[in-house]
Amino acid sequence: MMRFRGRADHAGTTPIAKRRDAGSAMFGFATNLAERLRAAGGPDSVWNFGIVTVGPGATNVVPAEAELSVEFRDQSPTVLERMNAAFHAAVQAAQATLNVAVSSTPTAALEPLAMDTQLVDLIAEAAVESGASHVRMPSGAGHDAMLLGRKIPAAMMFVPSIDGRSHDITENTDDADIRRGFRVFAAAAGKVIERLASKNGPPASKPGRERERAS
């Protein structure tokens, strides 16, 4: 989270040159940072300014404070390091040149994780056998699988959203794609069970069930 601290003044009577405008400083920083991230990132890099606030938030008052959330992602740790360096360089430049106080506080940092290739292959095989097309692609989002994958083999399967919309009230998936996804998922799960059985043997019967059969 980026924070900018300036001074509140009357927007109609205070000359531009004498203002310590936290809002203007924030917007200028965001524009500069976007260019730096674009130069440091790769073809799959993304970034976002998700939270923007100014205070006191009146049309006739120069903002005394402003906050900006910054997020950037890439599947390559090396590219992320470059983007992180570009971010800190932008912060240092802002601290040296802007006439407001500039500070940054990290809120989260997660290393990218590749899904288990064998599980991904099983899902692809299940798609082909079910007559469904498939595309291998990085998620780009944070999911439970990213955390589970650090402990156990993990993979993810997605079905398409209509027009590719996500995180919006218009997000929806066609019923046919949902049914197709269920079939592929069930086939993939069956393949996992078969592979485990061939590796470890069939599961042992529970004693209680053996007694039920004997009776």
Image: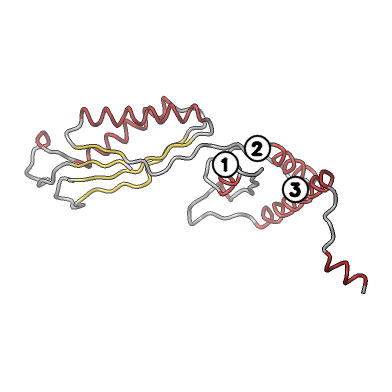
Where is residue 68 drawn, in percent x and y?
A: 31, 43
Q: Amino acid at mark 1?
A: Ser
Left or right: where 215 falls relative to 3: right
Q: Amino acid at mark 2?
A: Arg
Per the image, the residue denoted by label 1 is 139
**Front in this rendered view, residue 197 or 139:** 197
Secondary structure type for disc 1 = loop
Where is residue 115 drawn, in percent x and y?
A: 63, 39
Q: How many marks?
A: 3
The C terminus is located in which quarter?
A: bottom right
Secondary structure type for disc 2 = loop
Q: Amino acid at mark 3?
A: Ala
**Front in this rendered view, residue 40 or 28:** 40
Secondary structure type for disc 3 = helix
Per the image, the residue denoted by label 3 is 188
Q: Residue furthest top?
A: 39
Cα–Cα gap, marks 2 and 3: 15 Å
Question: What numbered label is drawn on residue 21?
Answer: none
Cα–Cα gap, marks 2 and 1: 9 Å
Per the image, the residue denoted by label 2 is 136
The N terminus is located in which quarter?
A: top left
Residue at left offset 21%, top offset 28% = 96
